[in-house]
Image (cartoon, rainbow, N blue to C red):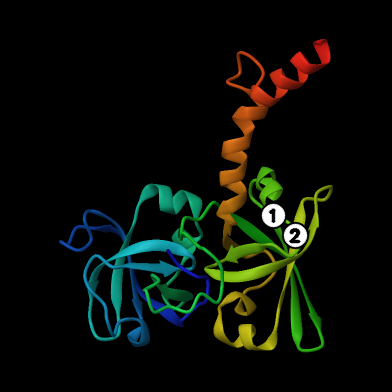
Amino acid sequence: MFTGIVEHVGTIIDLVELDNTASGGGGWSITIGEAEPVLTDCHIGDSIAVNGTCLTITEFEKSSFKVGLSPETLRRTNLGDLKIGNKVNLERAVSAATRFGGHFVQGHVDLTAIIASITPETNSLWFKFTLSDPSYLRYIIPKGYITIDGTSLTVCEVNDKEKWFTVMLVAFTQEHVTIPTKKVGDKVNIEVDMLGKYVERILEPLIKGDGEGGGYLDNYVKNYLSK
């Protein structure tokens, strides 16, 4: 579990598509350097969010660490597009002493989005995004939470007709995360607020049923009207 408050920005220093070392596990791995601030209490097997993706540390040194990427991670996130030298947002998993300044972030990226526009306003920046799967827009509400590349942000606008949403980055945030370094057309990781998904999961069967008949609420209303 994470908060979406980015602790540090690291740099990709190695990327191996078929890492047959003991820490690579025969799959895709990336090594992130310039990461000493998030490794002071590090252990093998710890969870760390890289661009909002919860990954497991398989090897580390004083200022660098390695993580493996599963095929599902590569499909769901922008991590497969990374190149050596790219910057990434880093956050350690929460501890009992963590101040919860963001929101409940699982580190389970739902999908990616494309930056549609970047517009300055005084010392802030407006970002407009379009989702790779527009159906996820139903989980995004104005003034609600969203996680973009591991950064907890507040949604400003949602346009259901044109299928986009916006956020605004204040000056402080711009200086401490990677999003402002990106350009129009770049891909970012999106994790929608999990509360909306849980509510839908609970209520949908009550309303729609199991597909063979109406749900409890639907049948209750029909029975009431029939009487």
User: Where residue 18 sits in the image (x, y, percent)?
Assistant: 27, 56
Task: Locate the C terminus and report the quarter of the image it occupies.
Answer: top right
Instruction: For label 2, count other residues whose C-alpha is less than 10 Å away and answer few (under 14), some (14-19) or many (20+).
Output: many
For disc 2, the marked residue is: 165
Foreground pick, 149 / 186:
149
For disc 1, the marked residue is: 140
In this rendering, would 25 be left or right of 200? left
Label 1: which secondary element: loop
At 55% across and 77% down in the image, what residue appears? Answer: 101
Label 2: which secondary element: strand
Task: Locate the N terminus and report the quarter of the image it occupies.
Answer: bottom left
Instruction: For label 1, count other residues whose C-alpha is less than 10 Å away and answer few (under 14), some (14-19) or many (20+).
Output: some
User: Where residue 108 sits in the image (x, y, percent)?
Assistant: 47, 55
The amino acid pointed to by label 1 is: Ile
User: Where residue 212 sits in the image (x, y, percent)?
Assistant: 60, 13
Examine the image and state in which quarter residue 140 appears. Answer: bottom right
In this rendering, would 219 be left or right of 105? right
